[in-house]
Image (cartoon, rainbow, N blue to C red):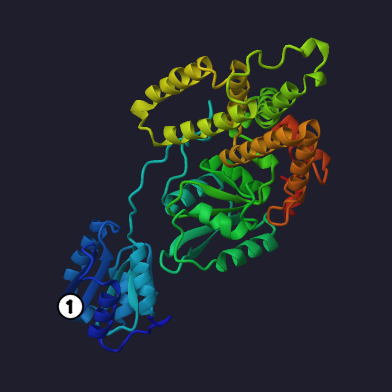
Amino acid sequence: MQKDTQPLFRSFEKNRNYIRDRLAVDKSFDVVQRDLEYAGVKMAFFLIDGFIKDDILLYIMDLFADLKPEDIQTNTLKKLVETYIPYVEVDEVDDLNKVTDLVLGGPAALVVEGIDKVIMIDGRTYPARSPEEPDLERVVRGSRDGYVETIIFNTALTRRRVRDRSLRMEYMQIGRRSKTDICICYLEDIADQRRVEALKDKLAQIDTDGLPMAEKTIEEYISGRHWNPYPTVRYTERPDTAAAHLYEGHVIIIIDGSPSVTITPATYAHHLQHAEEYRQKPLVGAYLRFVRFFAVWASIFILPLYYLFTKNPEYLPANLQYIGPTDQGVVPLFMQFLLAEIGIDILRMAAIHTPSSLATALGLVAAIMIGEVSVQVGWFSHEVVLYLAVAAIGTYATPSYELGLANRLVRIFLLICVALFGGIGYIVGITVWILYLVRMESFHVPYFWPFLPFSYRPFRDVFLRSPIPLKNRRPAFLHPKDPDR
């Protein structure tokens, strides 16, 4: 085990060898050590190939080549940092262990003979794709840029939209081995400082080797209730959506390696909102929101309700007696629902793993060979396919992908309740589901707010998509320092 800290040795060779051994330069081809000598002073560069801007280092070396011994004979460190290293992000580190950790993150380390600190030059450039519109959050009108996998790009995209002097980007590293960079982003003049500190404490308590799944790993550590299917944080890949939540008083977590930022806290109502509703006129946006709500509720309730009426046709009024399959098929109705639900998930997973050039072929196989043929041979009835398609469309119309998956589990739960207990099971199942949501919390915020506890203005805004000029108050549950917009 290495010590937590290792001050620099008096010997240049010891410092150089310590860093070389800790980075295992001889065992990794992409870890580069470059021994140099300028103005009679020995130096050594350590860097990761592919993480550093070569032209910056070449420029620095050209300037060093013109140095004379008298130029750096006194105050060597100060003169190098302030005069002869023409770069913006330069730091001094007196811990060799920290130096190696920083090098693995991208900056280059310059070890110089005769000085008691290592010069860190943050000239890194991570491989990154260009910002593109997120697939899950497309809009008809609006910006087409989205977050990428590089934290510096993501913080810049956020600050571009929030040019507020109180915007804070606090840096942390999580993971004993991965040393993953994360950023806690909030508006200091608006966000509740107690909420910010509580979140930072939770993040600081994460003790694991690394964050291979990035934001999902973070969520499981900070949200608790590991077997709860409902998301207690919201994800977005849109900088404008993240900026809107910052102005409300939310705290955002940006994680290096992930194109999704985490918004905390998030209630059930937050997962039902979409940027498209705010890119249209208020009345049109309100209509779109009602349509979306109908689709979400249909994805949960319509299939169990249809099954209930099929099992108990006496519940139907006379003018709705046509509901129910005329030919139920060979397979029992409940098994048809389960097989179809599993089949849709299989198709969804197949679509994820199918190259885009073959996606059309997969759709034809699903629609013709599986859907139509399965009805003809008696595996499914036409009405089961119809109502299941309505439920599936409602699931995909849900703005939050995580919420859609959780609602699907609730739908299966209600189907089981109806199969076991009929109408009483349907009512009790819905009651249990609502009570479960009511008891949930997202970072000490009631998950079902503003429905329970009821708050009129937010409740109106959730359902009506109020015009922006009329939304002159920030959400009260966030306890913002500045409640007025």
Q: Is residue 470 visible?
A: no
Which x, y percent locates residue 229?
62, 47
Along the line of sight, the residue nearer the viewer: 199 or 207: 207
Which x, y percent locates residue 164?
58, 51
- For disc 1, the marked residue is 39
Which x, y percent locates residue 143?
50, 34
Left or right relative to 370: residue 121: left
Along the line of sight, the residue nearer the viewer: 73 or 401: 401
Which x, y percent locates residue 123?
32, 60
Q: Residue at x 31, y 87 (%)?
A: 9
Along the line of sight, the residue nearer the viewer: 88 or 242: 242
Please state, as top left, top right, bottom left or bottom right, where the C terminus lies in the image. top right
Q: Is residue 239 above or below residue 327?
A: below
Q: Is residue 132 above or below residue 34?
A: above
Left or right relative to 31: residue 292: right
Q: Is residue 234 above or below residue 52?
A: above
Left or right relative to 123: residue 5: right
